[in-house]
Each structure stands twice: as structure tokens, then as C-alpha cells.
Image (tube, grey):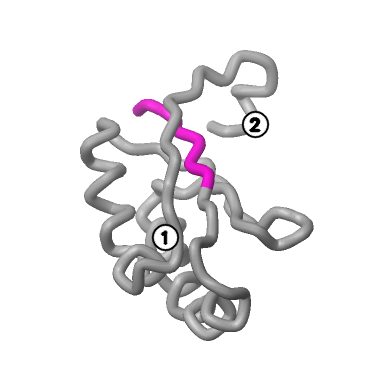
Amino acid sequence: MPTFVVTIDYMRTLPEIEAATPDHRAWLRGLLDAGHLLASGPFVPRSGGMLLVRAQTQEALERMLLEDPFAKLHLAMYTIREWNPVLGAERLA
């Protein structure tokens, strides 16, 4: 299954982001439990974040991202890049 790096850039104020963060993290937990999410977390300083995700296709990943509360509330924008891990790939298995 392909691996993708998703960068998230906030488009709203940090208080608006923080208000939606519990729902966003619950959505992430669902991706983790389904075996899609490998890692996630905010940037420092908190201007956005990054996801490391496995999905069948980029289109499938795009559909998943539409369910993110940040997307539903128009709080963030996403950049998706397919990634080919080489060194350390065994740690992602």
C-alpha cells in the first residue's frame, strides 16, 4: 500500500484550531485504528502539522481527508505527496 506525507497548514486562528483539535484527534484515532495512520503531530511552532499515512490511492486518501473536522470547518489546507521510504522502511511495517 502506498505511503503518503500530508502536510496541514492552518488557515484560521489558533483558538479556532484548538477548539476543533479534540474532534480532529478523534478522527486521527480512527485512521490509526484502521491501519492507515502511521504517525501524526503538529509543527513547532504550531502553524500546522503532518501526517504519515498509508492508503490504496491518493484519491482514497483525499476522500479520507474530507472527513477531517479541520477540513469540514475550513480550518486547514492539505498538501499530499506520495513517499517512497527506503532507509528505515522496515520500521514502518
Determine which of the numbered discs, if any, sits on residue 91 in the image: 2
Give the camera-side residue of 81 and 28: 81
Mark 1 neighbour class, 10 Å CA radius: few under 14, some 14 to 19, many 20 or more: few
Q: Is residue 21 left or right of residue 90?
A: left
Q: Secondary structure at mark 1?
A: helix
Where does residue 55 sit, x and y in percent of width and height?
33, 37
Give the camera-side residue of 62 and 3: 62
Three-letter amino acid code at disc 1? Asp
Return the residue found at the far top: 86
Determine which of the numbered discs, if any, sits on residue 33 in the image: 1
Instruction: Tell me where the magenta segment starts and ends, as one range.
Output: 1-7
Label the magenta part by its dominant secondary structure: strand
Q: Quadrant of residue 67?
A: bottom left
Q: Residue at x 44, y 40 (%)?
A: 79
Return the residue found at the far right: 45
**Height in image: 57 above or below 84?**
below
Q: Secondary structure at mark 2?
A: helix
Q: Is residue 41 left or right of residue 71?
A: right
Mark 2 neighbour class, 10 Å CA radius: few under 14, some 14 to 19, many 20 or more: few
Three-letter amino acid code at disc 2? Arg
Q: Is residue 75 left or right of residue 14?
A: left
